[in-house]
Structures are given as C-alpha cells and as structure tokens.
Amino acid sequence: MVLRWDGPQGRYEQQAGARQEAALLYARMRAGYPAAEWVVYRFLEAWREYLRLSLAGLVEDLQPLTEEPVELGPGDVFEQWADLAWVLTDLSPDTSRDAVTTSRALTRLQTACISDRVDVTAVHREMLTVTNFFGGLEAQVQALLEFRQDRSQD
C-alpha cells in the first residue's frame, strides 16, 4: 500500500483516516464494546488529529486569498482554531455563524479531553458538524480561487 506523508494528497488521506478512525471508535463504543472506557481516549485523540490536519489544510488553502501570511501558532488545535476563526470571519463574514458553532463544538471536545465523564454522542455529533463546515469551506475557497484564476486569464 502506498502511503503519502506530505503534500495535499497525503494530508487529505491522513485527514480522512483520522475522521474514519473516530467514526469506527464511536461505533465500537455505541455497540457496547467491553473496553469502551479505554477506547474513548483514542476517540478524542482521533478528533484532535483530524482538527490538526484540517486546520493545516485550511491555512494552506486560505493563504492565496489573504494579503498577510496566515500561520498556525505552536499551540494546540484549540488555540490554532481561535486564531484561524478570526481570519475566516474577516475574509468571509458570512461564515461567522458556522465559526461560532465550530467554536462551541471544539470547546466541547476540549472539555471532554480533560473531563471525568464524556458525552461521546454529543462530541461525535458536533464534530460531524465541524467536518461538514470545513468541507464546505474548503469547497468555497477552491471555487473562489478558480474564479480568480479564470478572471486573471481573461
């Protein structure tokens, strides 16, 4: 099996893998897996990995649309999202409602990562909303880049 560790295709495959891992772990917990209390840690970590890869991809996609460099700080994904949310809402104000929803979902995930009790169903549901937002945002950015490229060729 060929593995791509770098570049857009590698990032996409790793991102899809992290999302799939979270879904499989969630299914195990919902099915009454005997070691569910241990699986939940990997479930939360899979979502963090998905976020890390998604945010890096969004920064790369957004860079051509911004006048200033967009960089993710060295902090964790929750701090990185806080920085990137400002860039997104400044660049595209119509994303502000989705950015707020994403911030709430990430707050739930962050809280779950340090809690004694976790509502895995709520975390999973809200993170699926985040994946939809990120996917739509990625498509929107790509469409805008293609539009600008087409206009520059005319």
Image (spheres, rainbow, N blue to C red):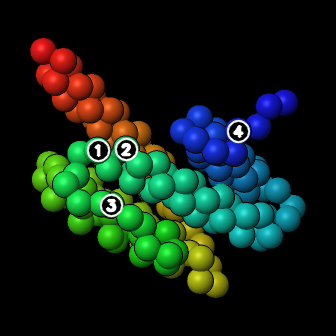
SS for callout 2: helix
Q: Is residue 17 above or below residue 125?
A: above
Q: Are marks 4 and 1 in contact (CB under 8 Å)?
A: no
- Amino acid at dot 1: Pro
Q: Where, by quadrant of the figure, is residue 88 drawn?
A: bottom left
Q: Which mark is residue 61?
A: 2
Residue 97 seen by the camera = no
Q: Is residue 99 above or below residue 41?
A: above
The residues tagged by marks 2 and 3 sit, at their Cα atoms, a distance apart of 10 Å
The residues tagged by marks 1 and 3 sit, at their Cα atoms, a distance apart of 10 Å
The residues tagged by marks 4 and 1 sit, at their Cα atoms, a distance apart of 24 Å
* In this rendering, position of residue 72 left or right of residue 29: left
Q: Residues within 10 Å of mark 3 (few under 14, many from 20)?
A: some
Q: Which one is earlier in the sequence, the residue at label 2 or at label 3? A: 2
**Which residue is tagged 1?**
64
Q: Work out whether residue 35 or residue 81 is closer to the camera in this orientation and state it.
A: 81
- Amino acid at dot 2: Asp
